[in-house]
Image (cartoon, rainbow, N blue to C red):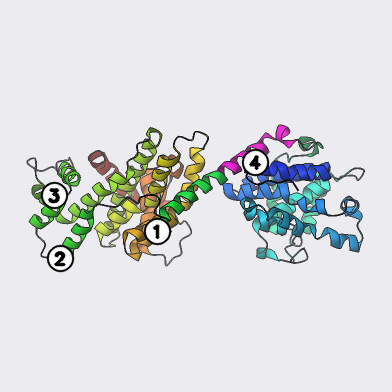
Amino acid sequence: MANTNGISLKDLIKTLLSEIEKNDPFMRSHAERVAANGLRFSKTLLLSREEINLIYLAGLLHDIGFIFLPAEIVQKRGNANDTEYDIIKRHPLISEKIVSKYPVLSNILPIIRHHHESVDGSGYPDGLKENEIPLGAKILSLVNWFDGMTVKRPPLKSLNVNDALTGIIEKAGKKFDQGLTEKFIAFVQSSQPVSNNDSGDSGKAEKTNPEAQQEVKRTEATHISREIVQDIINKYKKDEIELPVLSKVVHEIQEAMSNPTTTVDQLAKIIERDAVISVRLIAVANSVVYRGTGKVVTVKEAIPRVGVKETHSIVTTISNKSIYDTKEKQFKSIMENLWLHSLASGYVAKSLSMKLKLGETDKYYFMGLIHDIGKVLLLKAFSDMHSKNNSLDINEIMAAIHEAHASFGGAILRKWGYSETLIRIPLLHEGPDFRPDADREILSINLASNIANNIGYGLQEDMCPDPSKTKSARLLEADFGMIEDIGQEVKTLMDGVSEVF
């Protein structure tokens, strides 16, 4: 086969498809139809973009193993004798072996290997049953069989759509998954699957199937974005990217406040070591949220105004805000939205802890403040390293960051020396499949994040239309009224303090 070292995913797919076409143009058009219909059917199942991409790519390459089988046997598949059929049954394994040479395609190997398995265990190559078969392979099995029946190699006659669907119904629960069969029939009856004319015997589906062509481009962009994000994470691990640190003042205040004999004077002296924090603490104390009868001008005056415990939260917030700074204009608005989201999440988490009587309100505030720290630092590093590369799709980069930020955020907090309780927050707060015995801290931060998004503090793609319907809200027994009250309360608070920090 052709050498494909160092080429893009798109060019790699083109190269592999051209190898198929050299041996059998009919097989290439079959692969393109299966891929396109697999993509369309998968979208109706509301699968993730990643799952849809994998099914599409597996559809293109699922039969590539046939190019290493005798052509005379391949072309008489419908009339093969037992010996010939045993040879034909090797093609999923050969396809898997060919595709396994390319690491970028490793995730589609299970789909390719198992696309001829049957839910009753009678399929090949491994005789898997029911849930042992990957979902992508079950989908590909349906789409592949349907195309094989409705578009046959000349001079064989094809079945019409109704007869093909009747055949699928007869095989439901045996060859095909029962639930998927019903959904596939609905898909075929309500849409127009890609036909032989759509693909063309020449195999030039790129001109006639723009949706499929676009999916290849999107898949390539997704892969590149993940590689970039993983490279950033690796650089952090190797200390090739300097990790920002929260001000020493934050840790010193935390230690001081654990001592019940600590005085306001002692706290003031600690804070005054950091001029930026000092100035901003005074500004917060003079904001509409805390303003008293007169204007405070010193840290020592500011601490009683906002309260000793609140001082710790404010100092932590001020120190945390510096992490969101970026020199690149195109990322300033995203960073600003992430900052406002973290601040609002902190206030919501604090309010939840009070209304649900969870205790340790300052701890909940801090957890809300840092739950997305991984996302922030990954974006910050990306803006420093790749902002001038206009060929990169920022939406794909953000999707890749979203996938990686939870585990990365946990690693960052561990590196900063925080407790395992806090480390679990960025790791586990995403959900949404929480168990009934999930930690209330994690449930609270998930709900806090959703409420913050709902009231307008967050990225547009993270919008939550109704936080009261989330699983975290149900498990915490936070009803619609409570959530509405907290949302309004925090929105008013944010109007007063977001500009001060």
Picture quadrant where residue 455 is located: top left
Mark 3 — residue? Answer: 272
**Residue 477 to residue 298: above or below:** below
Q: CA separation, marks 3 and 4?
A: 57 Å
Q: CA separation, marks 2 and 1?
A: 29 Å
- Of labels 4 and 2, earlier in sequence is 4
* Residue 181 vs residue 307, the one in the foreground: 307
- Say few, some or many: other residues with alpha carbon within 10 Å of mark 3 (under 14 / 14 to 19 / 20 or more): some
Mark 4 — residue? Answer: 10
User: Which label belongs to residue 259?
Assistant: 2
The amino acid type found where label 3 is placed reads Glu
Picture quadrant where residue 488 is located: top left
Looking at the rendered structure, the secondary structure element under dot 1 is: helix
Q: CA separation, marks 4 and 1?
A: 33 Å
As drawn, is 223 to the left or to the right of 180? left
- Please say whether residue 352 is visible from this viewpoint: no
Between disc 4 and disc 2, the foreground one is: 4
Q: Which residues are magenta?
A: 203-222
Residue 401 place in picture, x, y as percent: 46, 47
The overriding secondary structure of the stretch rendered in magenta is helix
Classify the position of the C terminus by image quarter.
top left
